Amino acid sequence: MKLPFSVQDRDGIRCLTLSEKAGIEITASLRDALLATDLSRDVALNWAQAEHVHTSVIQVLLAWKQLLAEHGRSLTVACDNPQVRSFLQLSGLSEQFPSSSPDREMTEAGSADA
């Protein structure tokens, strides 16, 4: 089964891409994949192509962001999603997911499924 996320290293940054429906059913797989990565790199999040990001996925990302911060690393949104951003603003979580550049595109070349 192809999961709707990938984790890959590119140019000294760890890239997390969410696509399709990032629903509650991927929460455990996403958590396990993120916990299996080392914490030596900053993380760029690309959720521009996600049709839906469930609140449980947001919770996993918040926990991972905190763990990264404890290791002096950061999580930044490289490719934003207007629907997700709207939800984050309504819920007061927008500042937890800062956008580095809304127009920047991350390529999918060489992506490896997590």
Image (tube, rainbow, N blue to C red):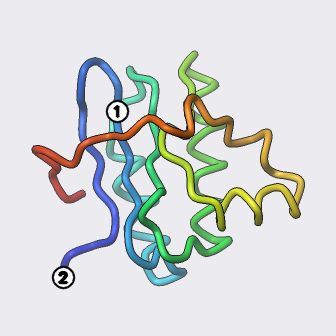
> Is 44 rendered above or below residue 108?
above
Name the residue at 34% across, 25% down: 13
Q: Could you tell me which quadrant the N terminus lies in? A: bottom left
Q: 23 or 89: which is nearer to us?
A: 89
> Is 17 rendered above or below residue 29?
above
Choose top left, top right, bottom left or bottom right for residue 72: top right
Q: Could you tell me which quadrant the C terminus lies in? A: bottom left
Check the image and name the residue furthest to the front: 103
Residue 85 as seen in the image, left or right of residue 50: right
Give percent across and percent down for residue 37: 33, 39
Residues at discs 1 and 2 in contact (Cβ within 8 Å): no
Q: What residue type is labelled 1?
A: Arg
Residue 69 as seen in the image, left or right of residue 46: right
Q: For residue 14, which numbered disc appears in the image?
A: 1
Give the structural element (helix, strand or loop) at label 1: strand
> Is 18 rendered above or below residue 56?
above
Q: For residue 1, which numbered disc appears in the image?
A: 2
Give percent across and percent down for residue 99: 62, 36
Give percent across and percent down for residue 5: 33, 62
Give the structural element (helix, strand or loop) at label 2: loop
Q: What residue type is labelled 2?
A: Met
Name the residue at 79% across, 39% down: 95
